[in-house]
Image (cartoon, rainbow, N blue to C red):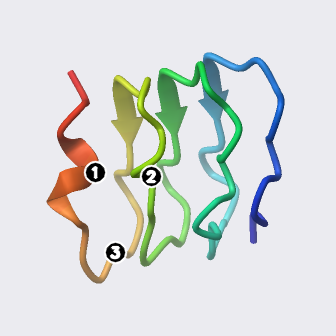
């Protein structure tokens, strides 16, 4: 589990959390990372995810997870 505000106040552009068997990422786990552009979460055990507040995000890798549903609004800003 990645808890709310786990990465707050960090200056991070690239964050790779792949192959970590992550089951849960709480809704505001990445809240406070204002410059995050690249997030790699592939090959975990995620079933849901909320990233609406990551306004700078350009790349997101979610392959190999177990999502039940994904809100397509989450992909609007990605290139």
Whole-percent x, y for residue 42 in the image: 47, 48
Mark 3 vs 2: CB contact within 8 A: no
Q: Nearer the viewer, residue 56 or 61?
A: 56
Above or below, comparing residue 78 to residue 66 in the picture: above
Above or below, comparing residue 45 to residue 8 in the picture: below
The quadrant where residue 34 appears = top right
Tell me the mark number nearer the camera, choosing from 3 and 2.
2
**Residue at disc 3, secondary structure:** loop
Above or below, comparing residue 22 to residue 6 in the picture: below
Tell me which residue sits at (69%, 57%) in the image: 29
- Give the labeled residue for mark 2: 51
Horizontal relation, residue 32 to residue 42: left or right: right
Whole-percent x, y for residue 61 in the image: 38, 40
Q: Nearer the viewer, residue 79 or 45?
A: 79
Query: Which badge, 3 or 1, is on the more N-terminal residue?
Result: 3
Q: How much space separates mark 3 and mark 2, taking CA atoms?
A: 14 Å
Mark 1 vs 2: CB contact within 8 A: yes
Mark 3 vs 1: CB contact within 8 A: no
- Which dot marks residue 28? none
The quadrant where residue 36 appears = top right
Binning the other alpha carbons within 10 Å of mark 1 as few (below 14), some (14 to 19) or many (20 upward) gives some
Query: Which badge, 3 or 2, is on the more N-terminal residue?
Result: 2
- Give the labeled residue for mark 1: 74
Binning the other alpha carbons within 10 Å of mark 3 as few (below 14), some (14 to 19) or many (20 upward) gives few
Q: Nearer the viewer, residue 4 or 68?
A: 4
Q: Quadrant of the N terminus?
A: bottom right
- Which dot marks residue 67? 3
Query: Which badge, 1 or 2, is on the more N-terminal residue?
Result: 2
Q: How much space separates mark 3 and mark 1, taking CA atoms?
A: 14 Å
Above or below, comparing residue 61 to residue 49 in the picture: above
Whole-percent x, y for residue 74 in the image: 28, 51
Q: How much space separates mark 1 and mark 2, taking CA atoms?
A: 6 Å
């Amino acid at each position: 589990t990645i808890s709310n505000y786990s990465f707050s106040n960090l200056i991070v552009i690239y964050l790779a959390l792949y192959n970590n068997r992550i089951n849960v990422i709480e809704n505001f786990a990445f809240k406070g990372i204002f410059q995050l552009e690249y997030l790699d979460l592939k090959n975990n055990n995620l079933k849901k995810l909320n990233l609406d507040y990551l306004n700078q995000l350009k790349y997101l890798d979610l392959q190999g997870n177990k999502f039940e549903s994904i809100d397509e609004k989450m992909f609007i800003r990605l290139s």
